[in-house]
Amino acid sequence: MSPPRFKLFFTVPRSSLEMCKQAVFSAGAGTYAAGKYSEVCFETPGSGQFLSGQGAKPAVGEVGKIERVEEVKVEVLCVGRDVMRAAVEKLKKSHPYEDPAYEVYAMEDV
């Protein structure tokens, strides 16, 4: 039986894109075909917004004001639960935001 597969999605300001990608790749994310391909991902440019509240320490913008940031959404495959958890942990440590936006989905082999 093959290991479980997960898809990790995260958004990041373009200025921190390469640093965050290298962090998740170093955990083994983005590896396909038993290692024949590595550092594989898909990127989509976009715009994010947030309103930071009392007690927040935003990396960009000011507390109490809506901030719009040019960001990139990254999609990357994680083969194995351990790889997925390590990739998320490394993403959290490398991302410039206090609470990075990310999602993880289990994938089915059909």
Image (tube, grey):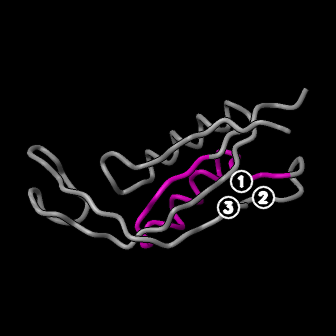
Cβ–Cβ below 8 Å for labels 1 and 3? yes
Of helix, strand and loop, which one carries label 2?
A: loop
Q: Position of residue 46 (x, y in %)?
A: 44, 71
Circle 1 packing at 10 Å, graded few (<14), some (14-19), many (20+), is many
Mark 1 vs mark 3, CA separation in Å: 6 Å
Decide if residue 32 is on the left or right side of residue 98.
Answer: right
Decide if residue 85 is on the left or right side of residue 16.
Answer: right
Q: Position of residue 40 (x, y in %)?
A: 73, 61
Kind of residue at badge 3: Cys
**Where does label 3 land, which residue?**
41
Q: Position of residue 79 (x, y in %)?
A: 75, 40
Q: Which stretch is magenta?
A: 8-32
Of helix, strand and loop, which one carries label 1?
A: loop
**Where does label 1 land, which residue?**
30
**Where does label 2 land, which residue?**
38
Decide if residue 9 is on the left or right side of residue 78.
Answer: left
- Going from N to C along the chain, the mark reached first, 1 or 2, is 1
